[in-house]
Amino acid sequence: MKLENKEWKEFNFIDIFEIKGGFYNKKPKKENYGMIPFIGATDSNNGITEFYSIKNIEQSSKTGNGKNASINKKIFNGNCICVTNNGSVGYAYYQKYKFTCSHDVNPLYLKDRELNLNIALFLICSIEKQRVCFEYSRKWRPKRMIKSKILLPINQNGRPDYDFMDNYIEIIKAKQLKKWIDFLRD
C-alpha cells in the first residue's frame, strides 16, 4: 500500500469539510480545575493552550465585561480537525472531544464520512502542506479557506478514498508499534 500507487485528485475544502469559524472571545481567566480544552493559535500541544470549566467559558466575553454570547456558540463538538488561521498559521490538530477555541482557529467537520483518528491524521498531513501559502499577513480565515484546495487519494468513483486513508495510517501505526516492541526487547 503505497501513496505513489494511488490516484490523487484536488478537491475544494468546502466540498470535503464543513468549515466553521472559531468564536471571537477573550481567553477566559486561568483556572486550575477546567476540563474543556481551549484551542488557540499555537504550533504545539495539539493546539491546547489551557483547560477551562463550562462556568468560566460561559462567563467570559470579548470585552471582559459580562456575557456576550450563549455557551452554545462558545463550545464546539469534537471529532473534528482544528486548523490555526492566525499566529502559527496552518497547523492542524484532531480534537476528539468538545472544546472551546478562539477565532484564530477553524474547526473542520468531515462531510461525507465519520471522522476517526486515522483519517484525521492522514487529512492533517494534506492540510498542513498548505501552511507555506499562509503567513501572518495572509491569514487562513474561513472566507479564504473555502477557496483552498486539498489533494487526496481517490476511489474508483473519483471521491476521496477514506478507507485507503484509514488503512494507510493503520499500517504506519502497526510498523511503528513493531519498532517500539523490538526496541524494548533488545
Image: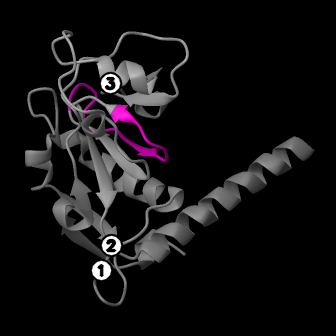
Amino acid residing under circle 3: Glu
| Tag 1 residue | 159
What segment carries the magenta color?
86-100
| Tag 2 residue | 112
Q: Which of marks 1 and 2 is in front?
A: 2
Q: Are marks 3 and 2 in contact (CB under 8 Å)?
A: no
Q: Are marks 1 and 2 in contact (CB under 8 Å)?
A: yes
Q: Where is residue 183 in the image (x, y as percent from the top left)?
A: 83, 44
Q: How crowded is mark 1: few (under 14 residues within 10 Å), some or many (20 or more)?
A: some
Chain-order first, disc 3 or disc 2: 3
Amino acid residing under circle 1: Arg
Would residue 1 be found to the left or right of residue 75 on screen? right
Residue 156 shows in the view = yes
Q: Which of 113 and 184 is in front in this view?
A: 113
- Residue at 38%, 57% (x, y): give it: 123
- Separation (CA) of disc 3 from disc 2: 32 Å
Q: In this view, does 3 lie above or below 53?
A: below
Would residue 42 be found to the left or right of residue 35 on screen? left
Label 2 secondary element: loop
Q: Is residue 126 above or below residue 142?
A: below
Label 1 secondary element: loop
Q: How crowded is mark 2: few (under 14 residues within 10 Å), some or many (20 or more)?
A: few
Chain-order first, disc 1 or disc 2: 2
Outermost bottom residue: 156
| Tag 3 residue | 58
